[in-house]
Amino acid sequence: MRLPALAIMLFAAGAATAADISVVGLFPNKAVLVVDGGTPKTYSVGANIAEGIKLVAANESGATIESNGKRQTIAIGEHVNRSPASGGKASVTLQADGQGHYMVNGQINGGSVRMLLDTGATLIALPASEATRLGIDYKKGTPGYVNTANGIAPSYKVKLNTVRVGDIEINQVDAMVQEQGLPFILLGMSFLNRTEMRRDGVQMVLTKRY
């Protein structure tokens, strides 16, 4: 069983107050949740958690909650918070690791990915192996070159159909696929520029701008 320290604040349609849902355990197709500070309870996929809120998926990576027709996946080290303070805009809170880095679970073109938030990267940058896994025919993109620790490497500029982090989904995002010298995906400014970023200690809150 995975024991993440996660929480999600959701506002159900017609509900007077928010449902405060914490994820304290994860199993295949089941999640152990604490609702509004109550005792932990195991929910199976398809179960109603609160009024207008349902558990639609659960695995070792996180629990997917549906509220008002929208889905959020709560992954290790992050939580989704939709509150009046954000003006109803989609937002996600990221937790820094022990080195101060923000590793993000998300989706690119519908495929699951893990990315490192990097404000120094102009574009989202993908290793060629990850682009291939995601079904991106990157060699049809605009060719170029990048400097790496091992010298100059070929690169290709492409456009991603969708990039999703928590409850934030952005369409038509510029990216670069690099054939050498990139060990993981970098979540760069072509995505981050379309969010408001606010850092509070070890947490980073992203709120969708447009």
Image: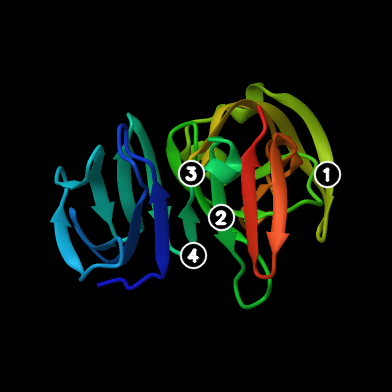
Question: How many residues crowd around disc 2 within 10 Å: few (fewer than 14), some, or many (20 or more)?
Answer: many
Q: Can residue 178 be seen by looking at this rendering?
A: no
Q: Earlier in the sequence, mark 2 or mark 1?
A: 2
Residue at image mark 1: 146
Q: Which amino acid type is shown beneath numbered disc 3?
A: Arg
Which of these two is toward me, 76 or 184? Answer: 76
Q: How many marks?
A: 4
**Element type at marker 1?**
strand
Q: Nearer the viewer, mark 4 or mark 2?
A: 2
Which label lies toward us, 3 or 4?
A: 3
What amino acid is found at the position of numbered circle 2 in the picture? Thr
Q: Estimate the x, y position of residue 113 in percent, counting from the top left.
A: 49, 48
Q: Which residue is mark 4?
A: 77
Q: Is residue 123 left or right of residue 24?
A: right
Q: Position of residue 85 (x, y in %)?
A: 59, 45
Q: Earlier in the sequence, mark 2 or mark 3?
A: 3
Q: Which residue is mark 2?
A: 93
Q: Position of residue 32 (x, y in %)?
A: 22, 64
Task: Work out whether mark 1 precedes mark 4 in sequence or the reverse, and give the earlier one.
Answer: 4
Taking the image as drawn, is residue 114 in sight? Answer: yes
Q: Which residue is rendered at x = 41% and y = 60% of the image?
A: 7
Query: Mark 3: which secondary structure?
Result: loop
Q: CA distance from mark 2 to mark 3?
A: 10 Å
Element type where label 2 sits in the image: strand
Dot 1 or dot 3: first in sequence order is 3
Choose top left, top right, bottom left or bottom right for residue 138.
top right
Write the residue at 71% across / 42% down: 196
- Residue shown at 41% from the left, 64% from the top: 6
The crowd level at tag 3 (other Cα within 10 Å; few <14, some 14-19, many 20+) is some
Image side of residue 163 versus residue 147, left or right: left
Badge 2 vs badge 1, beta-carbon distance below 8 Å: no
Disc 1 and disc 3: Cα gap in Å?
Answer: 39 Å
